[in-house]
Amino acid sequence: MNPISHISYLEATARQRIAGLLDPASFREIIPPTLKRVSPHLGLFGAPVAFDDGAIVGEGRLDGKEVYIFAQEGKFRGGSLGEIHSAKITGLLRRAAQRKPAAVIGLFDSGGVRLEEANAGEIGATEIIRSIFDAQKTGVPVIGLLGGSTGCFGGASIMSCCCDTLIASEEGRLSVSGPEVIETVMGVEAFDSRDRALVWRTTGGKNRFLFGTVAKLVEDHIPAFREAAIQALTVKQPLLPAKLKQDLERLKKRIDLYGKCSDAKQIWQKMGFASEKVSEMTSEELTTARDHQAKL
Amino acid sequence: MKLQDLLTQLFPAGCKTVTTGWLVSGEAEVAGKTVSVIGTTEHTFIGVREIVALSEKFLDIAERFPGRPIIMLVDNNGQRMALDEELLVLPEYVAHLLKAEQVARLAGCKLIAIVYGNTVAGGFIGFGMGADRVVSVPGGNTSVMKLEAIARVTKMPLEKLQELATKVPAFAPGCENFFKMGGLYEMWTDNFPAQLQRLITSDDFQDLRAQLGRERGGRQAAQSVIDEVLRT
């Protein structure tokens, strides 16, 4: 890729990501930082606050269509789910259920629940999930993007998997327990979080794409995320019993086939890929390889 | 409290439930009407295998008994923490369970979760907090992370956290704190059948948690922020 045209999603701030994703100058923020809705809890711990509490919500246009958008700022306390942070996202999703924009776009970048307000964050995560379902029920699709520097863990990871479509770059890590947490609780032999290659193979976008969790794999390039989000605007996954049963069979089969694997390389090999090459492939190459594999 | 004691106290008219290892399922009578029961026990961890079993129950009940309330008996020690679980994309499994609960809700089944044992973090999100109403009974204990672990991560002295825990419901473990935040609809101490009947027969399905958190003083900002976004 031409380095001059490369606009990294990974390295951008949440606000830069929004600006690059939406149609130029179309974003209008709801509860902007000038209103200073800061965490009522962090101060008790002597921790710094942010005027947006690490969550930016608002409305704008994508390919000319009206969309709502929320973005977590991973650079503020790991994009963690606090009381205000979660309430802004819940409010946006409930607003979408009422006013029916073309879609809600969620830019996940979060270590999960904020420990200093753990109960508020955990309840907040489930309020968001209920609101995602309520928006979907009224026909508004929710599109999740994964590619931020913090990744997407804990309650945020579960929220993201409730979206109609997930778009990710290889850098977009996704798991419930983060590698560091597993190492802290279970020991280094259970998961060596300093082994970066292992962490990326396990939780990174490629593994999630090959399992079908992620619908579209893109390069770490904001315009690529934008293009994929436009394509996803019309994709809806209504929660129909037949669809859920089908998904359940797929998830069961995944356990049967790969439940004994201890490394993504084993899984990729079993799937029929040249496992050593997967890490080197571009998103396009891997997509082509997967489509080819699916036809066999 | 023990599962057997809970079942006896909750369903004096009798219940037909089967406990297989960690999984509880079956049906019971509440005020002459049949309800479905799905529960977990033995402080199980919620991993991919537990989830497919639970999801299957919800989908099965939604299909065969639409409109019938589902009583969820909650006891878990959180999500299963392991590399092989995460390799298979654990969050997709937890989300599937939540979607299966939503399918049951859309089929007219009211979901009532009763926390009678432990319930922790991702385990509670997947099985418990997805219900329409979540209540606790004596012996129930909710937590996200132990204070010792919070101390390690936030680098705050444990003594300071223990002191804060007595007055800040936002982070400290325990049902009382969760109740103040609006995360528990009620904390039952006795007379479970009448209370259960009241929740089942109520038409109220709305998510009131932010509102309750404000009324109870634990989460004073969330509801007003939600309202502010809705108004703008």
Image (cartoon, coloured by chain):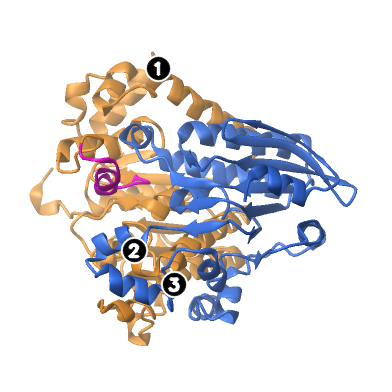
Eye-nearest disc, 3 or 2: 3
Q: Give above or below for B30 relative to A80.
A: above
Chain letter behind tag 2: A
Q: CA distance from mark 3 to mark 2?
A: 14 Å
Residue B184 magenta: no
Residue to which mark 3 is pinned: B170
| Label 2 crowd (10 A; few <14 / some 14-19 / many >=20) | many
Whether residue A243 can be seen here: no
Q: Amino acid at mark 2?
A: Ser
Residue A80's disc number: 2
Q: Is residue A185 left or right of residue B90?
A: left
Q: Secondary structure at mark 3?
A: loop
Chain letter behind tag 1: A
Image quadrant in which you'd find residue A100: bottom right
Report the number of discs: 3
Q: Amino acid at mark 1?
A: Lys
Q: Residue at x 59, y 63 (%)?
A: A97
For the view shown, which residue lies furthest in the bottom direction?
A35
Whether residue B144 can be seen here: yes
Q: Secondary structure at mark 2?
A: loop
Q: Which chain is orange?
A: A
- Tell which of B212 and A135 is nearer to you: B212
Say which label, 2 or 1, has the lower sequence index: 2
Residue A180 magenta: yes
| Label 3 crowd (10 A; few <14 / some 14-19 / many >=20) | many
Residue to which mark 1 is pinned: A295
Q: Is residue A101 left or right of residue A53?
A: right
**x and y, in percent, of residue A130 in the image:** 57, 58
Q: Residue at x 61, y 52 (%)?
A: B116
- Tell which of A42 and B89 is nearer to you: A42
**x and y, in percent, of residue A256 in the image:** 45, 20
Which residues make up the magenta segment?
Answer: A175-188
